[in-house]
Image (cartoon, helix red, strand yellow):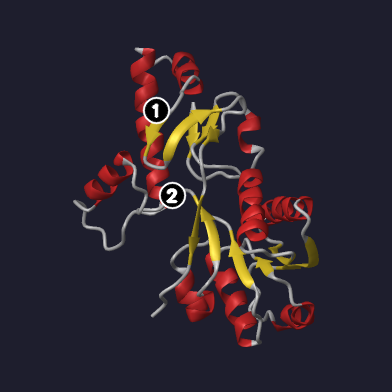
Amino acid sequence: PMLSTYSTHPDVTKKGSYIFRLCFIDSFQGQVMSSFAFNELNARTAAVLVNASSSYSETLSDFFQDGFVQKGGKILFREDYVDDEKNFRPIVERLLPLKPDAVFVPGNIVDSGRLIKQARDMGMKAFFLGGDGWGSSMFAHAGSAIHGGYFSVHWHPGNDSETSRDFVIGFKGFPHKEPPDSGTALAHDAVFLLADAVRRAGSLDREKIREEIAATIEFQGVTGTISFNRDRNPVKPAVILKFENFK
């Protein structure tokens, strides 16, 4: 059996019945962010800026766009760029007059940070939204321009469940300068969920272990209570974080 921690593309588990994952998938993540933009930020218009070098960015953009339109929102602008792009002024110049309420930028930390900084410098006032490809390192590339931006993530150290609190406390015993991130938490859950499945199987036989992983119901993980659906994807929540208090 394979337990993937950070493969969010919907097709991953469709490649074989022994493939499972601990993270949410892009169809869910896109719906979460489109709902948040429409319902919580009251955005009615949006733009989508896509890293065409990344299938992750393209897939997540599609799901966000579909979800936003289904809720009654309007996509005013969609534009591709490439991974090593350094000058986003031509794109921003075309986008600025449209004045979207939100701009979805599901790229990686470097390109998203660079794009947002240039857009803010040029006067863009919209909410900037991203996916789980973002993280705290965005500050290094966007500076204060990322203030007020939102992104979806799998877990946060502030989670108040007992399992999560114990994990954070235990992590402090290691010589790390930074607190654990969601990737670390997902890896922790993968190891302990596998161990639980082996224990329940009472065997190291791969078929028996695979059946026990598939039968997992309400496993108390760091990143949430985990059960698997028929596509071997976890049924669990997403977390939305906001960038603020930049110094």
In the depicted structure, whether residue 228 falls above or below residue 67? above
x and y percent of residue 124 in the render?
Answer: 66, 81
In the depicted structure, whether residue 161 falls above or below residue 182? above
Q: Which residue is mark 1?
A: 194
Q: Residue at x 45, y 75 (%)?
A: 140
Q: Residue at x 31, y 61 (%)?
A: 178
x and y percent of residue 63 in the render?
Answer: 71, 50
x and y percent of residue 245 in the render?
Answer: 41, 75
x and y percent of residue 203 in the render?
Answer: 36, 13
In the depicted structure, whether residue 104 falls above or below residue 30? below
In the depicted structure, whether residue 246 falls above or below residue 58? below
Q: Which residue is mark 2?
A: 155
Q: Nearer the viewer, mark 1 or mark 2?
A: 2
Kindly identify the amino acid type of the residue bearing the numbered disc 2.
Trp
- How crowded pointer 1 is (Cα within 10 Å; few <14, some 14-19, many 20+) is rated as some
Q: Secondary structure at mark 1?
A: helix
How far is disc 1 from disc 2 in space, using C-alphas? 19 Å
Q: Which mark is residue 74?
A: none
Q: Residue at x 61, y 24 (%)?
A: 230
**Near-viewer residue (20 or 225):** 225
User: Number of callouts in the render?
Assistant: 2
Q: Quadrant of residue 114?
A: bottom right
